Image: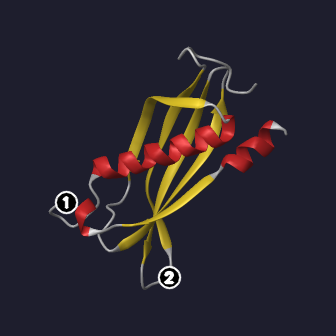
Amino acid sequence: MTLEERIAASRTSIFKTVFPNTTNHYDTLFGGTAMHMMDEVAFITATRFSRQIMVTVSSDRIDFKKAIPGGTFVELIGKVIHVGNTSLKVNVEIYIEQMYAEGRELAIHGDFTFVALDEHKKPTPVIK
């Protein structure tokens, strides 16, 4: 499988509903909850790409472009955007969709860096 095919095959998309237990007093999604969901999607993407133990080592510039209201759907999309020797970078975007209307808009995006680990918890090549 080529690198481009691996990247395409590891693309991850997850839909969630923004319920009241995930919103703040403004009835918008907690920023920390959004970051948690983004890291989870990034982890799934990185693991699907490498099929190895992957751990988050950093998150880079998470931009909150638009508040995410309660009572909406969100789609999180993870894509591998850089592959190094023992690490890779995943971009995650969150889109808002209204439940009862057409259209969607980008709300948040950010990058997460992961390192592949061997059975001794030491960095190992991402692609074997």
Query: Judging from the image, what secondary structure is the residue with disc 2 in?
Result: loop
Residue designated by label 1:
24
Color theme of the render: secondary structure
Q: Against 24, is 121 above or below? A: above
Q: Is residue 94 left or right of residue 29?
A: right
- Dot 2 amino acid type: Glu
Residue appearing at x 14%, y 62% in the figure: 25
Residue sitting nearer the eye, 113 or 20: 20
Q: Against 19, is 99 above or below? A: below
Image position, residue 45 (x, y; %) = 59, 44
Measured Cα–Cα span from mark 1 to mark 2:
25 Å
Q: Is residue 21 left or right of residue 127?
A: left
Q: Quadrant of residue 13?
A: bottom right
Q: Residue furthest right?
A: 1
Image position, residue 96 (x, y; %) = 43, 67
Residue appearing at x 32%, y 74% in the figure: 71
Image position, residue 66 (x, y; %) = 35, 60
Q: Residue furthest bottom?
A: 100
Residue appearing at x 41%, y 37% in the figure: 61
Image position, residue 63 (x, y; %) = 39, 46
User: On the rendered image, what quadrant is the C terminus found in?
Assistant: top right
Residue sitting nearer the eye, 31 or 13: 13
Query: Judging from the image, what secondary structure is the residue with disc 1 in?
Result: loop
* Nearest-to-viewer mark from 1 and 2: 1
Label for residue 102? 2
Residue appearing at x 63%, y 31% in the figure: 52
- Dot 1 or dot 2: first in sequence order is 1
Would you call the spot at circle 2 few (<14 residues within 10 Å), some (14-19), or many (20 or more)? few
- Dot 1 amino acid type: Asn
Tag 1–tag 2 contact (CB < 8 Å): no
